[in-house]
Image: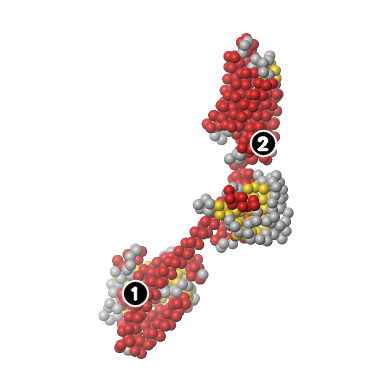
Amino acid sequence: MIIKLSSHLLNNLGYVIAVSFFFTKFESAKNIFIREKRTKKDTALIALFFSGLAILGTYVGVDYKGSIVNTRNIGVIVGGVVAGPEVGIIAGIIASIHRYLIDPTGITTVPCSISTIIGGLLSAYFYKKSNNKNLFLYGFLGGFIIETLSMGLILLMAHDFQLAKEIVSNIYIPMILANSIGVAAVILIIEEIITEKEITAGKQAKLALEIANKTLPYFRKESLNEVCKIIADSLEAKAAVITDTQMILASYAKSNDFIIDHTEIKSEATKEVLKNGKILALGMESELDFHCINGNIQSCIISPIFNGENVVFGTLKIYFDKKLAITSKYELLAEGLSMVISTQLEISNLENFKLKVRDAELKALQAQINPHFLFNVLHTTSALVRINPLKARKVISDLGTYLRFNLENSDRMVSLAQELEQVKAYVDIEETRFSDKISVTYDIEETIENINIPSLTLQPLVENSIKHGILPKSNGGQIHISAQKEENGCMIVIEDNGVGMSPKVIEDLDREIDKNIGLKNVHNRLKIMYGNGLRILSSTMGTRISFFVKAGEPNAEMYNS
């Protein structure tokens, strides 16, 4: 009899497994299983399914001396372990009531009804204890425990103990085998869905990363239309749109059949996403409202875009011309793309902010240089006015030329040749004042005269050599300025045979102190522009200051804005 009952139950188990398999193949059912947060509707639907599975297990059972040899507890245990406490408890209650109603006076009715309810509660407990790796074991254990409990209750509660004993001795093993194996089998089917979700998520993540790599250069250039094009092409969509909270920022349509001819947000669906910050999928099961775009659009996904403070500041909208059932695959991908756009926009804004800060720093440094230079020139001129008016006139003329050029180019990159004109104007002024104490020579390679450098870079260095290197010597000295081409740029050197520079001055270049302003400002500007500042070698025999200028340095672009 045990073999016969086991064979019958295993046959019935095939029905349960088949129903479970086909149910999980429905896209809507599959989405419920893999969705991290379920709605009340999702919970009700999945509870209804597992309740039905438990009832099916009762109906396909076989009568044995007033008892029903069945697979009812498969639906209850699997529902609770896999889908959560609410599902397990609901399925247990419904299946228990059904078992009681179909045979209220049966010898095993009350014990089996009680054990089924307990099965729902036990599955809820196992759900909290289990994880994706041990669902199989907890399910098998749950099936074993509930059937054992059911047999025990039959022996304790039956009015005819001998009959109950005979029933239990013949159905216990078949029930244990069928329900424990059945629970494990159904869980394996559902685990396959979970695994498929992970594979799908991995593919979506890979696609999102590929799109991120393609779109990154266009975020830097603030060309969001191109970003929309890449997204639409990658997803085989007909159009893509990026909005802020009120306006369309960028868009792309695959052809003239799908035209977006407005700038303000019209779609109520978009406004809803902006309001609640939740992704909205409109597919063949939805009442569509796509008056915001021309053409035969049948479905779309609208995903919120958040800023760094987790506040919605826009949306990503992807349109399709097919009546798609928007699945979790599309939702996950859209959500990933929104995160990519959010991150890229944050990075882009940060980079723009940094450029503005650098620009402000550079202008502030240059503003410090101009008064410093003017003070020295005016001091020289005031001395010459009394002793040599003609030379004073020459100084004023040189100063006018210098200031005119300086005002026109103070926040720009200039050619090396133009910068040297400034230096020569300054040197002429200083030579006028100090006569034969100063001698300046130039060795400039002609091929690099057009290379761009920050304006007012050389003059403060030459001024430093004159003031602190040459003039302290009783007989004056010489300054040599050279510029030689090197790979990716040129090396500029200012050398003098003056008294040398104090080691402390060199050490103080990178410190926040208000000394040696001219030298320090040039050093800081070069560091901002090229990453490296001045290199200074000094001794009692003189000083050598050098720096490298990179050709086409990206940071220099701010000077041309």
- Which residue is drawn at the image coordinates 58% and 24% (left, top)? 118
- Which residue is drawn at the image coordinates 67% and 59% (left, top)? 260
Q: How many marks?
A: 2
Q: Which amino acid, mark 1?
A: Asn
Q: Locate residue 504 relative to residue 40 in the image: left or right.
A: left
Tag on residue 464?
Answer: 1
Pointer 2 residue: 24
Disc 2/disc 1 C-alpha distance (Å): 81 Å
Tag on residue 518?
Answer: none
Instruction: Confirm whether residue 236 shows in the render.
Output: no
Tell me where residue 406 sits by quadrant.
Answer: bottom left
Depth check, front residue: 16 or 133: 16
- Which residue is drawn at the image coordinates 69% and 31% (left, top)? 19
For disc 1, the neighbor class at 10 Å (few under 14, some 14 to 19, many from 20) is some
Depth check, front residue: 91 or 177: 91
Q: Residue 270's spot in the image, x, y percent?
A: 63, 52
Q: Residue 20's spot in the image, x, y percent?
A: 67, 32
Looking at the rendering, in which quadrant would you find the N terminus?
A: top right
Give whichever of discs 2 and 1 has the lower sequence position.
2
- Which residue is drawn at the image coordinates 61% and 18% (left, top)? 111
As drawn, 187 above or below 549: above
Q: Residue 134's spot in the image, x, y percent?
A: 55, 32
Q: Locate residue 293 relative to residue 202 in the image: left or right.
A: right
Question: Closer to the observer: label 2 or label 1?
Answer: 2
Depth check, front residue: 245 or 380: 245
Q: Secondary structure at mark 2?
A: helix
For disc 2, the neighbor class at 10 Å (few under 14, some 14 to 19, many from 20) is some
Q: Which amino acid, mark 2?
A: Thr
Q: Secondary structure at mark 1?
A: helix
